[in-house]
Amino acid sequence: MVISGKELATEMKRQMAERVKELEGKYGRVPHLVVVLVGDDPGSVSYVTGKAKAAGELGMKSSTILKPSTISEEELLGIIEGLNRDREVDGILVQLPLPSHIDADKVIAAISKDKDVDGFHPLNVAALWLKQPCLLPCTPHGIIRILKHMGVEMAGKRAVVIGRSNIVGLPVAKLLLDENATVTIAHSKTKDLGSVTREADILVVAIGRPKFVTADMVKPGAVVIDVGVNRDPETGKLCGDVDFAACEPVSGMITKVPGGVGPMTITCLLENTLECFERNMAGK
Ligand code: GUN
């Protein structure tokens, strides 16, 4: 069974569009997301375009600040400071990766934690690990949403996450743990990876290598969530970290790339923007 993240995202966006209209009536303006893009990496440009398009579909306002990759760290920090102070900006997203002369950790920490729609600020990360209210990182939250929507029981199940990034691997492992799954984090140095992944009732793959997960690595009937966005070296087409054609028959449920996790990431980003707006307008 193929899981459509796109369908769930469409339904969530429909509901959010109604909420945006209601809030516009109440407050006289709509949520405003600002995306900062440094440089012209084609992957980043396409992500940012997708985010702006989805915001527009919901009736939200989005602005993109484009800066050349030669921008200094100081100037970038100055831009963020201005956005933090601007009362009509509800969410701030700095597209990653940043050029190597800029300290990304410093930039992320400079974003107001209340406008941090990515959930990357150290205070939001700490709150996640302490199980306190916070802005959740979008891809991990989208994955949990998909699993709940599909009625996947997580409590007591073996979940294996391949990848340990701050953006996906670590936070999704924590969210699965919060759902009472028994969680293993595997990575590029894991020995005999197949023997680990074959234990997984739920397998989340975020390693960034095209078609890395093969059919022999999947437990029959497992739920497979593919976070990868790669170019297939043979066909040049978009592909995930999972060899979909080979793994689909073995799996119980599986997401596709594109149309799987990606649309839910964007939807959760817009949900965070809406939440920031509501808190901002309520003066909290
Ligand atoms: N680059 C790749 N994924 C992401 C993301 O979720 N947020 C930001 N800001 N940059 C990214």
Image: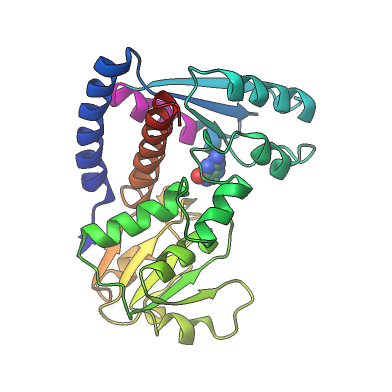
Relative to 20, residue 224 above or below? below
Question: In which image quadrant can residue 187 be found?
Answer: bottom right
**Is residue 90 in view?**
yes
**Is residue 235 in view?**
no
Q: Is residue 226 left or right of residue 192?
A: left
Depth check: give the residue in front, 74 or 132: 132
Question: In which image quadrant can residue 105 be found?
Answer: top right
Residue 210's spot in the image, x, y percent? 49, 60
Depth check: give the residue in front, 30 or 231: 30
What quarter of the picture does the N terminus occupy? Answer: bottom left
Q: Is residue 13 left or right of residue 106?
A: left
Q: Is residue 89 left or right of residue 57?
A: right
Taken as a whole, is the magenta stretch helix, strand or loop? helix
Relative to 212, residue 255 above or below? above
Residue 32's spot in the image, x, y percent? 43, 22
Relative to 213, residue 220 above or below? below
Question: In which image quadrant can residue 251 be found?
Answer: bottom left
What quarter of the picture does the C terminus occupy? Answer: top left
Magenta segment: 46-59
Residue 201's spot in the image, x, y percent? 33, 78
Q: How is the image coloured?
A: rainbow
Name which residue lies at 69% across and 37% down: 107
Q: How many marks?
A: 0
Depth check: give the residue in front, 148 or 226: 148
Residue 64's spot in the image, x, y percent? 52, 21
Residue 82 within the magenta-colored segment of the rendering: no
> Which residue lies most toward the top here?
28
Q: Is residue 265 left or right of residue 74?
A: left
